[in-house]
Amino acid sequence: MGLITLLLIAVGLCMDTLAISISCGMCMRRERWRFGLKVASVFGLCQALMPVLGWLAGTGLKSLISAVDHWIAFGLLALIGGKMIYESFVLTEKTINPRKTKVLFVLALATSIDALAVGLSLALLDVAILLPAIVIGGVTFVVAFTGVFIGHKAGTAVEKQAEVLGGLILICIGLKILFEHLGIL
């Protein structure tokens, strides 16, 4: 898997993290640097660990589903991307306190379930997991840290667009994987 594709996957995966970190930033009055580092660390760690867990599960299943692995990878990425786009249009009231570490971990786990599915897809495609996990975690760290500051300055104006962009990126990567395995690309 090329570095550009890997970076696009990482960016796609962390768009929901961007939306949440923007929301977290909206709650901040001071201590933005320290809080930004806390948010980025929690989200980056979860986004790095979840693909590893998915990859471990996928390596155990590979022999059973290797004939259709590209369809599964496409399906998972398209489902995740579609879910992100759908959720960007669903209005939900957010009444959580992101300053609590427990709340941050729950949010990070909820947003990194997608990374678990990507890890499963990477296992099915015979992609080693170390570099993708590091890139996904690192990109998420940077995006979450930046999101706290965007949220502090811009508010909710960019949340929806981030979710839609992330969803579209994941769907396009799923199509690329499918087309490569079908010999179209």
Image: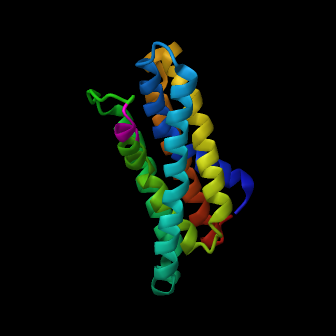
> Residue 136 or 125: which is nearer the viewer?
136
- Above or below, 60 against 118 in this view is below
Q: Quadrant of the C terminus?
A: bottom right
Quick check: 162 above or below 76?
A: above
Q: Which residues are magenta?
A: 100-104
Q: Residue at x 53, y 49 (%)?
A: 45
Location of residue 173 (image quadrant)? bottom right
**Rendering coords of residue 134 (x, y %):** 65, 54
Q: Position of residue 2 (x, y in %)?
A: 73, 59
Vertical arrangement, residue 75 with respect to residue 63, above or below: above
Q: Position of residue 44 (x, y in %)?
A: 55, 45
Residue occupying image coordinates x 44% and y 61%: 76
User: Which residue is at the front of the view, 106 or 17?
Assistant: 106
- Residue 177 coordinates in the image, percent (x, y): 60, 63
In this image, 53 relative to 134: left or right?
left
Q: Is residue 120 visible?
A: no
User: Which residue is situated farthest in the bottom direction here?
Assistant: 63
Residue occupying image coordinates x 50% and y 35%? 39
Q: Is residue 179 left or right of residue 104?
A: right
Image side of residue 102 versus residue 19, left or right = left
In the orientation shown, which residue stands out farthest toward the right? 3
Residue 99 included in the magenta stretch of the image: no
Against 155, is 162 above or below? Answer: below
Residue at left 55%, top 41%? 41
